[in-house]
Amino acid sequence: MLPKFHKWLPLLFFFFSTCTAIFATRENCCILDERFGNFCPTTCGIADFATSYHSVVDGDLRILEQLLQDISNSSGVTDNLIRQIRQVHVQPATQTSVVPGYTQKSRQIIDEIIRYENIIVGHENTIQQLTDMLILNNNKIQLLKQKTAQLEAQCQQPCRDTVQIQELTGRDCQDIANKGARQSGLYFIKPLKAKQQFLVYCEIDNLGNGWTVLQRRLDGSEDFHKTWNQYKEGFGHLSPNDNTEFWLGNEKIHLITTQTTVPYALRIELEDWSNQKSYADYAHFKLGNEADKYRLIYAYFAGGEAGDAFDGFDFGDDPSDKFFTSHNGIQFSTPDSDNDKYEGNCAEQDGSGWWMNKCHAAHLNGKYYSGGTYTEKDAGPTGYDNGIIWATWRDRWYSLKKTVMKVIPFTRLAIVTGQQSGGVKDVDFGSRGDI
């Protein structure tokens, strides 16, 4: 429709210009349109033409107006669409700054979730362990309840000593044997100067010989690293079958060995890790009192294949080895009471109490080494020979498996050995003094 409207514009222009300026003649007449005929156009011709085509033009104008209205409406819709497109187009730019923030926050949330999941798994494992412990403890509780019930049943009965202590008593084990005892076991004795009786293990044979046992080593179950008072009073456990380790006590040994003018004999029994056995006997053995630091005194070595380690041993380290490792006349030392002849503390270095000189050739209270052989490195920081040693029978770097120290009145020694007891060896304790 728009082209038709443009077609009438020259005609209207011509109409106004003709009516005002040009007078039609035959010569200047022109046929503008065949619809006007052969006559030059006049105002009346144009009016007739306009009238005849007025309705058509009005229709075209209405169509044009409708088109313009449609275009206007379309322009409004287009404007809305453009605004929407602009909003949509701008949104990604805004989201580019927002999305990373949400992404980071999401990652943090995921990390937190993973961390909490790990914590939950850890707690679940802990709960499982605690559950297992609870089940185990419940089982133990049930066992304890059963044991408690058994003990309660036993407690309903009169209490009885499970360790049998023999009824006979005496001044020592030989005195008990003299009274007719023929069974080894636990007995109470009361030496003449003792204020009260105390328990000992008596080794009694069918011939009536009664040994009073002073010390026993057999498995390393007892720690011999003790103080002065512990060695004085004794430690370890006495058992009716003599299968435990113990030290009877220096005060008790003193009371036993000095109670009469009749001297005692000391027997040392040894066993190595090849189950080889040996012994050493000492005549006229006794210990001094506490004021004299329980000094070891004997008259002479009375025999035995183990040799006289109490008399010292030449280790080949120094010409004075034998002199400074002898034990006769030496006071007792412990880690907390140094009474030796060494500038250091032999008992502290060796970790046990003994009659230390500078320091020893015999040491039956030493450290228990399973298997026997040990080294300076095994001995610890000091590196000294601190095992269970009897140097005249086994090397000082060989720790014995079993030892026993026991006494019997010297008059019974000949009966025990089947030999005549020899005369007393001259020993000048005064010239030697506190070696």
Image (spheres, rainbow, N blue to C red):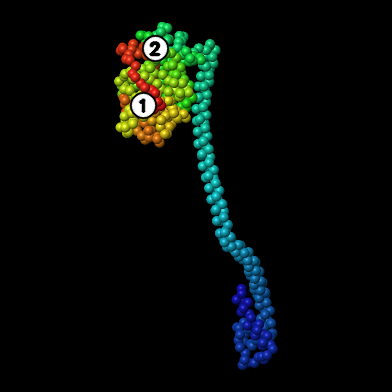
At horizontal 39% and vertical 12% (from top left) the residue drawn is 210
Tell me residue 221's x, y (percent). 42, 24
Tell me residue 3's x, y (percent). 60, 76
Tell me residue 321's x, y (percent). 34, 30
Q: Let me know if residue 87 appears in the view.
A: yes
Q: Let me know if residue 211 appears in the view.
A: no
Crowding at dot 2, Cα within 10 Å, few <14 / some 14-19 / many 20+, comes out as: many
At horizontal 64% and vertical 88% (from top left) the residue drawn is 40
Image-quadrant location for residue 419: top left
Q: Is residue 120 above or below residue 107?
A: above
Element carrying mark 1: loop
At horizontal 64% and vertical 81% (from top left) the residue drawn is 9
Foreground label between 2 and 1? 1
Q: Which quarter of the figure is the C terminus placed in?
A: top left
Q: Disc 1 residue type? A: Ser
Image-quadrant location for residue 365: top left
- The mark nearer the N terminus, 2 or 1, is 2
Image-quadrant location for residue 260: top left
At horizontal 42% and vertical 7% (from top left) the residue drawn is 179
Element carrying mark 2: strand
Please name the residue that numbered disc 2 is placed on.
210
Determine which of the numbered discs, if any, sits on residue 326 in the image: 1
